[in-house]
Image: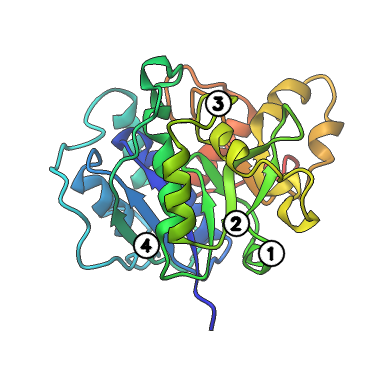
Amino acid sequence: MPRHAYATLLTSDSFYPGVEALLKSLERVGARDPLILLYTASVSRSTIHALCHTRQGARSNRLSPRTACPSVGTSSDKGSFSEGRHSSVASQHDTAVDKPCQSIAVIPREVAEIPHPQAEKCQVPDWNTCFTKLRVWEQGDFDCIVYLDADTIVLQRIDELFLRQPLPAFAPDVFPPDKFNAGVIVLKPDRQLFQQMLSRVPDLPSHDGGDTGFLNSFFSGWYEGPAGQRLPFRYNALRTVFHITYRGQTGYWDSVRPIKVLHYCSSPKPWQENSPQTKLEKLWWDVFTGVGPTDSGLI
């Protein structure tokens, strides 16, 4: 029986809301496979515990505790989300969950950070650790993994991605369109391939300065390769398209529907200060608080 899993990466407590929303979205659509939570030593134990177990004190929480490995890492407990916007985000745990759903199994795995080769030039602070994403290829106890960035939510079942061939498979970026965005990856773990990637981190160019650009250089034949490697945009629907086009012409966004995975690329994220306040961000909050998504006209 093939071993399948979802995976995501957490390198900072500040992205806890993103992972929580991702988990809730997978639970809401009835995902049956576990999620591998790759995390670094900079993440507190309280954050890992919160992601692996149902929140205490919810008024009407019908989720069973998420299954977790016995060991959840050795990071010191920094007590995340104690002030500012993160405090208001954390308070959303008290929101009732009206729809019963099966809790997803979480497999927490602490991994060593892969430093950004040009950290001093990195324009986005969150990208200083983004190359750690490559460690998903190390998870050799699974036959196929669907990797999802921590700023994505799943809106429909995506089990069919586990049958995708050949691998790896990516969805196109907005620009340039002959490049892919690495927020969603369908891959077959391969430790030898991982070592090859690791050896090229210092010298391969990255057109965007992050992991997406590096992976495009490493898998440079993606656009001309077999069709199976090119996922439809709906599997990694970038909110950039919505923000650029929706107010003037809804047809661009409508042409992507039904959306399977929504990617809140670019910053600030929905849970961060000064985030855009559009219907798309409200949809993220609906998922995070367990009441949605409620606006089916968008997805």
* Secondary element at tag 2: strand
Q: Position of residue 290 (x, y in %)?
A: 48, 50
Tell me if 165 is positioned left or right of 9 in this view. right
Location of mark 1 (residue): 164
In this view, the mark in front (3 or 1):
1
Residue in the picture at 20% in, 63% down: 71
Compare marks 4 and 3 and give the one earlier in the sequence: 4
Of callouts 3 and 1, the N-terminal one = 1
Callout 4 amino acid: Val
| Foreground tag (3 vs 2) | 2
The foreground one among 291 and 223 is: 223
The residue identified by callout 3 is: 266
Quadrant placement of the C terminus? top right
Q: Residue at x 27, y 67 (%)?
A: 69
The residue pinned by badge 2 equals 186
Front-lying residue, 22 or 167: 167
Does the residue at mark 2 contact the one at mark 1 (Cβ under 8 Å)?
Answer: yes
Spot occupied by residue 33 in the image (x, y as percentages of width and height): 49, 69
Q: CA distance from mark 3 to mark 2?
A: 21 Å
Q: Residues within 10 Å of mark 4 (few under 14, many from 20)?
A: many
Q: Which is closer to the viewer, label 2 or label 4?
A: 2
Query: Residue 106 got which mark?
Result: 4
